[in-house]
Image (cartoon, grey):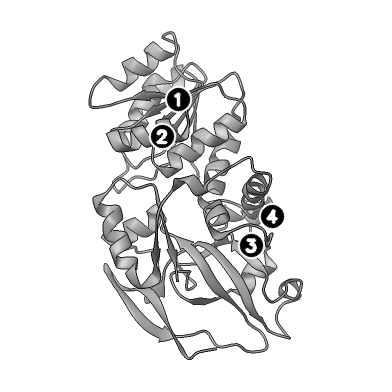
């Protein structure tokens, strides 16, 4: 294996550099993969523009990974020994400790000692990556059928996060679902709702470009444009003045939290999926939650089980994420890719080293 490789490194605060770094070197107790593809996540974008106090720098970022195993040490953990050289994999990046209250309940994404690829471990915007042994021990390394291409599966992780939210919402076929934001995450929420048999999906989107894309990808949805009409009034109009049973804020705009609570049907369920920049206060009307008996849920990352469930949907051809890939860039042009995401309303960009 060559001594150096290209990688995109979060060096300090808001600074990034595409640079040559030492390649992970094979030894008897480690595992190394060759990165086939790594997607730019909304979290990566926020880190690129604002930095992140959650990342131990210097750090290679990138956590939506599809890769091939190229080295498995002879004395690596027995869980790693179950894999073979050449095996294609995805990785659930949030790794629980396995012992705390949340981990014992299967909620590894809520582990009090959570460590994450691209945050505490070097990530996938590189040619090669050493996989933490903890990821094997906790089952976060997931084998992928050799028949599936990178474009088909590299987005499993962010979609698993939407599944995490929807499991809390208990969506039924007879529900009306309103989604604030028609970016990739919003569209994935709509796709999963459709798989649950939902007939009526309302999407609220400011960008005309994204609204048109959503209509093309998910025919039959109802689009509401916040710049053209009152959002709450429009949602009420579309639901016979009752409101949707399920509402999802799939964007980082505090006003959508307010609108979701105002628009919800009695006993509606709301997922505050999109995290807000600090201070994230002042958007929730507690009296409306109280008197309408609303359920308001948070969501953070995803579990290994949810990643496996999404991969299964892809394998069964029930879920097509490839159509949401706007562009593919080589690693040497990753900075151009980030700039493109800043300047254009693209859905997903994939980096292929």
Residue 353, disc: none
Q: Is residue 145 left or right of residue 280?
A: right
Work out whether mark 2 precedes mark 4 in sequence or the reverse, and give the earlier one. Answer: 4
**As drawn, 36 above or below 229:** below
The kind of secondary structure element at disc 1 is loop
Q: Is residue 176 left or right of residue 61?
A: right
Quadrant of the image occupied by residue 168: top right
Closer to the observer: label 3 or label 2? 2
**As drawn, 321 above or below 187:** below
Give how far apart the Cα atoms at labels 1 and 3 are. Answer: 35 Å
- Residue 157 at x, y = what percent? 54, 53
Residue 221, disc: 1
Give how far apart the Cα atoms at labels 1 and 4 are. Answer: 40 Å
The residue lying furthest to the top in this view is 240
Binning the other alpha carbons within 10 Å of mark 1 as few (below 14), some (14 to 19) or many (20 upward) gives some
Dot 3 and dot 2 residues touching (CB under 8 Å): no
Give how far apart the Cα atoms at labels 2 and 4 are. Answer: 39 Å
Work out whether mark 1 precedes mark 4 in sequence or the reverse, and give the earlier one. Answer: 4
The kind of secondary structure element at disc 2 is helix
Give how far apart the Cα atoms at labels 1 and 2 are. Answer: 8 Å
Work out whether mark 3 precedes mark 4 in sequence or the reverse, and give the earlier one. Answer: 4
Q: Is residue 4 left or right of residue 26?
A: left
Q: Which residue is mark 4?
A: 104
Q: Which residue is mark 3?
A: 140
Q: Residue at the location (62% across, 68% down)?
A: 135
Q: Which residue is mark 2?
A: 214
Dot 3 and dot 4 residues touching (CB under 8 Å): no
Dot 1 and dot 2 residues touching (CB under 8 Å): yes
Compare residues 117 and 285 and report the one nearer the observer: 117
Compare residues 342 and 295 and report the one nearer the observer: 342
Give how far apart the Cα atoms at labels 3 and 2 are. Answer: 31 Å
Work out whether mark 1 precedes mark 3 in sequence or the reverse, and give the earlier one. Answer: 3
């Amino acid at each position: 294996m060559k001594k150096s490789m290209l990688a995109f490194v979060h060096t300090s605060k808001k600074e990034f550099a595409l640079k040559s770094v030492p390649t992970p070197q094979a030894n008897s107790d480690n595992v190394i993969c060759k990165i086939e593809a790594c997607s730019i996540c909304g979290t990566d974008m926020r880190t690129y523009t604002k930095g992140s106090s959650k990342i131990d720098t210097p750090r290679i970022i990138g956590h939506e990974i599809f890769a091939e195993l190229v080295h498995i040490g002879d004395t690596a953990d027995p869980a790693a020994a179950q894999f073979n050289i050449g095996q294609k994999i995805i990785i659930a990046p949030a790794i629980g400790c396995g012992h705390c209250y949340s981990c014992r309940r299967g909620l590894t994404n809520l582990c009090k000692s959570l460590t994450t690829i691209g945050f505490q471990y070097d990530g996938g915007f590189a040619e090669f990556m050493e996989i933490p042994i903890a990821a094997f021990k906790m089952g976060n390394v997931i084998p992928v059928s050799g028949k599936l291409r990178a474009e088909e599966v590299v987005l499993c992780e962010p979609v698993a996060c939407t599944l995490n939210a929807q499991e809390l919402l208990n969506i039924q076929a007879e529900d009306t679902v309103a989604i604030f934001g028609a970016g990739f995450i919003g569209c994935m929420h709509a796709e999963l709702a459709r798989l649950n048999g939902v007939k009526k999906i309302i999407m609220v989107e400011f960008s005309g470009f994204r609204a048109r894309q959503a209509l093309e990808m998910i025919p039959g949805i109802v689009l509401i444009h916040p710049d053209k009409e009152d959002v709450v009034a429009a949602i009420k109009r579309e639901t016979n003045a009752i409101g949707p049973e399920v509402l999802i804020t799939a964007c980082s705009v505090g006003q959508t939290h307010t609108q979701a609570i105002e628009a919800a049907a009695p006993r509606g369920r709301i997922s505050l999926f999109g995290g807000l920049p600090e201070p994230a206060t002042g958007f929730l009307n507690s009296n409306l939650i109280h008197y309408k008996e609303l359920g308001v849920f948070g969501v953070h990352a995803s579990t290994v089980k949810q990643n496996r469930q999404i991969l299964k949907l892809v394998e069964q051809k029930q879920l097509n994420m490839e159509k949401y890939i706007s562009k593919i860039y080589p690693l040497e042009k990753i900075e151009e890719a980030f700039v493109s995401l800043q300047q254009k309303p693209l859905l997903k960009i994939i980096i292929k080293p």
